[in-house]
Image (spheres, helix red, strand yellow):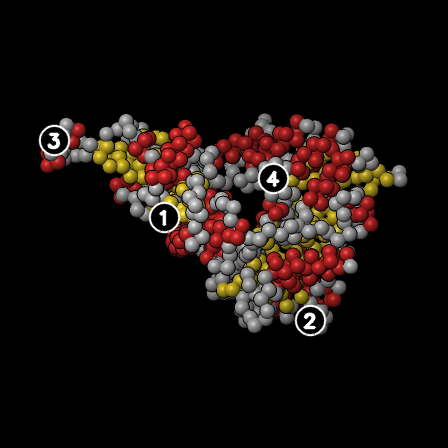
Amino acid sequence: MQNNQYVNREISWLQFNARVLQEAADKTVPLIERLRFIGIFSNNLDEFFKVRYATIKRIDLAGKGGKSVLGGVKASTLLEEITQIVIEQQSESLKILDSIQNKLTDHNIFIINEKQVENSQKKFLKNFFLQKVSPALVTIILNDLAELPRLKDSAAYLAVKMTMKSPAQKEGVPTTAKAAVTEKKYVLIEIPRSIERFVVLPKEGKKQYVMLLDDLIRYHLHSIFNIFEYESVSAHMIKITRDAELDIDSDLSKSFIEKISESVQDRIEGEPVRFVYDMNIEEDTLQYLMNKMGIDVTDSIIPGGRYHNRRDYMNFPSLGREELLYEFYEPLSIPGLVLQTSLLKGIAEKDYLLHTPYQNFSYIVKFLRESALDPQVRTIKITIYRLAKISHIASSLINAVKNGKKVTVQIELRARFDEVANINYAEQLQKEGVNLIFGVKGLKVHCKACVIERQEEGRLKKYGFISTGNFNESTARIYSDYTLFTANQPILKEVNKVFDFFEVNYKINRYKHLIVSPHYTRSALIKLIQTEIENAAAGNPAGIRLKLNSLSDYTMIDRLYDASRAGVKIKLIVRGICCLVPGIEGMSENIEVISILDKYLEHPRLYIFENGGKPKIYISSADWMTRNLDLRVEIGCPIYDHSIQQEIMDTFEICWKDNVKARVLSASQDNAYRKNNKPALRSQFALYDYYLKKIEKERS
């Protein structure tokens, strides 16, 4: 095995997050959007520490080296390397944030702190604090507590130190007579999550002012602590991140909903894995807190800036400044499929492809609403992984039940960080009479599929859709995904087989069309790769094009290396983790990899195999990660319609030619932007133009 055969998964993920940070640094990105990328970078990092760092720490604490599962790196070494990379990235992110905030002043937007308050703003801030903030504050004086209260995961706290006046000072004795020992009080103030982090102050002429809630609290420290006689007071932010892996109770007497609910509750008690603090905090305050919290050297201790929970920048207010935001593009229609008419009639004639957010997600909602109302529809089956906060999908399914349809929903309660929302939806759907399935023991259900049965001419005809993304109205505005609408009976019969597997787990079905995990995806993909190797050896057209979120399964990477050695040209577009090392002579010289980060989140999974000149094309919910291949239920769906095949190949090539937002992934791991002498092509904008031209062509 060569030393350069794989990139460590965690290090590759951190390089992906560095690409997010590049977007925040990109001066061509609108200013407020750059702030939001700072938020995305920070939110990603929080989730990384809750899950991946926590898992590596568990391996280390168990006394295991971890080399076999961590790509040849010891867990303890990897923990140190991660911390160093994160410290550097955090430092870079603070510099970028400062530069953005300075640039905002050129546009008359000022983010002020407690020391920059003007007299004209004091009344507004006082009223805002008294009416909204003060009633919501949780303030804990630590000195009298034997143990520190359990701090909430990823909540932000102001660590306050009050240096108290000595008895001599209280009596007005001169400073020289002060007591030798000065009492100190330590306090924690939890930043309320119920209040928006950014407080928008009244405009003054053309100037707009924004204040972070943290600074508004700092500004009112005297109001909070006016019952104490203190000489000085200071406040610095701290945050801890806890292990967020779910440990599922094996008690058979409990329902699955109960087990997940309790496990999510236990997450609150998870062990700390990261402690971030304001680097300007006083040393005595820092040591006091670390001793109280039991933070030690095995935890990731990261000196940070004045503000934590910068994920809140994802929701930085727009301030009515459209010129500082991405231009809005109205989602387009699908040529030939009209929202104002029956979708089922249209789909009965031919397959259609929806590509969000370029095209309108309303097609999915309309499909379900029409099915709920159609007297001929008998059953609806759908998988749910993540739903929007206010979900038209859920309301359509409830509507269908009320109209006498038999509705079956496979809902994944373990969708990470959406567990509570999914539990709430599960209880709501169950109450309304929906037949709920909670998946397969030991497997997450990650596939995205729906099938309905409609009575037509004395028989049941199936209609449905299969997608690469979640059925979520909110994320569909910013996630790019493919959804195939089809009435192809053989394909939909196999989707029904997947639903059968949910209910009868011991029965493993055979599939002729779909590629289904956990039983067949790995072997099917290896067979498809082998066919390309054989075609290359025979001088037939051979090639592999993949679009993935992540590529980390070593076996699949090895098969791609085999194909490269056989002369198969391989093009990979991988948004996130990529453990494959391209461009290495004798191993991967025929493999090129790019990653695209831009306005929308690149989310589709797409497989194109040249197959001797008759391409085999699949859209899928599965990345090429071990969990997707072996530990989840996933569906890869073949594309048989020739016009849709061409559309998918067209859209892949548009992305492949991106020379504005594409980064070249290489052994150097430097995230270099792809540059060439060709005209600038920004794929996400070019894709919108591609679909716009399709509509114009249809009209002409």
Question: Counting residues from the N terminus, which is met first, the one under dot 2 or under dot 3?
Answer: 3
- The number of numbered discs placed on residues in the rendered structure image is 4
Task: Name the amino acid, label 1.
Answer: Gly
Question: Counting residues from the N terminus, which is met first, the one under dot 3 or under dot 4?
Answer: 3
Q: Going by the image, does 108 lie left or right of 512?
A: left
Looking at the rendered structure, the secondary structure element under dot 1 is loop
Say few, some or many: other residues with alpha carbon within 10 Å of mark 3 (under 14 / 14 to 19 / 20 or more): few
Look at 62% across and 29% down and name the residue there. 427
Question: Residue 576: where, in percent of width, then height?
Answer: 54, 55
224 versus 110 height, above or below: above
Identify the residue under disc 4.
Answer: 388
Question: Residue 226: where, in percent of width, then height?
Answer: 28, 29
Label 2, label 3: how many angstroms apart (C-alpha)? Answer: 95 Å
Cβ atoms under marks 3 and 1 closer than 8 Å: no
Look at 19% across and 34% down and name the residue there. 182
Task: Find residue 305 and name its label.
Answer: 1
Cβ atoms under marks 4 and 1 closer than 8 Å: no
The quarter of the picture where residue 288 lies is: top left
Question: Residue 670: where, in percent of width, then height?
Answer: 47, 63
Task: Name the amino acid, label 3.
Answer: Val
Task: Name the amino acid, label 4.
Answer: Ala
Question: Which sits in the foreground, 546 or 23?
Answer: 23
Label 3, label 1: how many angstroms apart (C-alpha)? Answer: 39 Å
Task: Find residue 173 and name its label.
Answer: 3
Label 2, label 4: how many angstroms apart (C-alpha)? Answer: 49 Å
Task: Find residue 537 and name its label.
Answer: 2
Label 1, label 2: how many angstroms apart (C-alpha)? Answer: 57 Å
Say few, some or many: other residues with alpha carbon within 10 Å of mark 4 (under 14 / 14 to 19 / 20 or more): some
Question: Which sits in the foreground, 246 or 285?
Answer: 285
Looking at the rendered structure, the secondary structure element under dot 3 is loop
Label 4, label 1: how many angstroms apart (C-alpha)? Answer: 33 Å
